[in-house]
Amino acid sequence: MFKLLLKKELIELAQIYYMDNKNNKKRNPVSIALYVFLFLIAYISMFVSFMATAHSLGSILFGSDNVWLYFAINALMAVAVGVVASVFSSYHSLYLAKDNDLLLSMPIKPVDILMARMSKVYLLSFVFTAMAFLPSLVYYYYSVGFDLYLLICGVAALLFLSLLVATLTFFFAYLLALLTRKTKANSFITVFFSLVLIFLYYLFYYRLNTMMNSLLLNVENISDFVSFALFLFYWLAEACLGNLLYLLLFVAFIVLLFFVCCLIMKKNYVRIMTASSATTNKKVDISKSRVSAVQTALLKKEFKRFTSSATYMLNNGFGLVMSIVMAVMLIIKKDLLLSAVDTVIYTDASYASLIPVLLFSMVCLMVSTNPISAPSISLEGKTFWLLKSLPVDMKDVLKAKERFCVLMNLGPMMFLLISAMTIFKIDIIVKIEMIIDTILYIYFMADLGLIMNVLMPNFTWTNEVVIIKQSLAVGIVLLGGMAMATLFTVFAYLLRYDISVNIYLLLVLLVLLIIRVIFAYLLNNVFNKKLEKIA
Amino acid sequence: MLEINDLCKNYGSKKAVDHLSLKIEKGEICAFIGHNGAGKTTTLKAVAGILAFEKGDIKIDGISIKDDPLTCKKKIAYIPDNPDLYDYMSGIQYLNFVADIFNISLKERQEKISRYSELFEIKNELGQLIVAYSHGMKQKLAIVSALLHDPQLLLMDEPFVGLDPMASFKLKELMKEACNKGCAIFFSTHVLDVAEKICDRVAIIKEGKLIKSGTMEEVKGDESLETAFLELE
């Protein structure tokens, strides 16, 4: 039975390449080849970047007494990458698979279902771990040389390091499933969990350079610390260098960890898998109902839609969190930034005039990463009949979606802009222009998203990820917004001797204002009618 | 109350509704009968203003849905066969949303939500997210939301599917009550016994064409509605 289930899981995994999620049809051979090609390009790019890191570490550690530290640090990186990359697919595969009820209704042992799904997750973990750890092995063999025995040790280390990554993702997935089962705020927990993981991942990479420098100065102390506190990575590193005893210790420890994890998960696997979201039996007090105007009701609806989906929040609202983080970082690292800017201005004084435009473009880039309105019409999906049957003007529907996108962006972006403006000495008129330009740009992005979505709607999706991550409307708005933000800087650079920043920002304001008027006219008179006709 | 004149709706080359004309007066209950794919849902969706159509006109209380859709929709309530509602809202949030769209006063909505949710036994579930509702509960919620603004024309697509016997009974009673108040009801069904018991009129559609319509007696004569329907098929 396990083999059959495993085959099914592997077919599902392979479907990513040969099935089109948008229409559930088989891709044509050219499309499959293109998809595989793109995957390989992305994978090889990451592989090369990890190879560069391995080279940097190798140049410090090869030839020293602490070569093992080279493998230990690379393994730590691989674990970080592997866990971040596969924890959510692990959660979805283990607990939220669509065939849960179907499989449980068949004469199949739940443990077989669990093991088959774990095998799939292991395979995914292996792909990500190999991407980050294999370069370190290849670079070591290339620089120091190798024999068959060393190669076998390396492959075994990689296989069991992948099992460690998989076990950690099983554990996190279990934790996430337990938490979301007990609460109604599932999407917020998922977003919080994701942000913590992403934060830790970036913190690790942000500190990598500092770590390497201190490693260079303090190899002995660091190696003592790692071998003691992170003994598992010491064992793995020694295993990569051909130490059989440490390889066996490492394998035994990982297998034990995996076994314990299986025992814990197996215990209440079916209960968690079949549990629906936490429900409340609390009586609703109907007298507490509030009356809202149509626009407010539609706006509230948009807010509920956005906050109900972790995928929507993470993919189309990540920039909101990042802009707040960036604003805080700008204030904290103010002196560092000012000295860097001074150095640049020292080489060419004309660059000083570019600062306000650069700050404005930076905020625009952040706005571009939040295309909240771009999938919002398609996300109505099967419920679109409601808006069409209710006495609500499509103009109001579009206005509510626009307002929601603007309101979500306004606070964080103004915080970022004002934080950036306080660092530099900027003329008050220019500051006002920057604020108005930013507001107009936020409107531009919201309107562009709506227009693109009305032109390319998709109401027949079965998985919202297709709309949020893979729709053409979102792609165009995201890249178009980024391109526009970049163009603001490019034009400012080209025109820096011809017009003052004051005039330049005024021109930007005029352009954005004209676009705003055109877009508002189109949304109120053309695209509302187009939306009404969509069945 | 409802006047459909020469309605035509195509899906590509397929004629879903073919020159259909029908009239329903205030206070009448009209059953819409036909085999699967005959064009019942398409007609109902066109009347509800969800689907645009190529030819013909639909008038609600004398107002064309093409000319003034918003005024027409204020007089209508539509309940689809498979009520896909906003899963991310709780039952009470959904009802308040619908009430807001119809601009229903606080007192009136509280009174109606309380009455209908109690009647359909979903009052205790109104705090739950709709995603946790069963098909039947969603159907009940859709019915409650449809009744909030006292519609003048109630359009229902297979309203009894998924309802428990008690809820079906209560819906039938409510339909009669609404009719007595002057509401017109136009609903599709495959349950011919129910149609025969509660309807004043019946319309039979086949391959997009209305093949027979009239009062119940005119259509079925001395036979049962089921026999009359099968003879026409």
Image (cartoon, coloured by chain):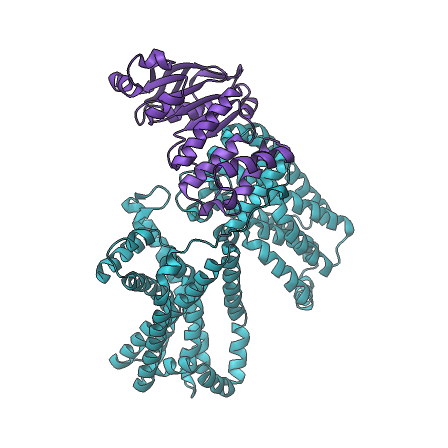
Residue B161 sits above or below residue A318 on the image: above
Residue A404, above or below A331: above
* Shade of chain B as shown in the rendered figure: purple
Horizontal and vertical percent for residue B167?
A: 43, 35
**Which of B163/A383 is in front?**
B163
Instruction: In the displayed orientation, state which residue is furthest to the right.
Output: A428
Rendered view: A131 above or below A275: below
Q: Nearer the viewer, residue B198 or A435?
A: B198
Q: Residue at x 54, y 23 (%)?
A: B75
Rendered location of residue A128, percent (x, y):
38, 65
In this picture, residue A422 sits left or right of residue B44: right
Residue displayed at 54% across by 69% down:
A203
Residue at the (70%, 49%) spot, across then down: A434
Residue B134: percent from left, percent from top? 41, 44
Q: Quadrant of residue B43?
A: top left
Residue at 30% across, 55% down: A104
Q: Is residue B202 above or below residue A425?
A: above
The colour with which the image depicts chain A is cyan
In depth, the one of A109 and A479 nearer the eye is A109
Q: Position of residue A534 (x, y in %)?
A: 46, 30
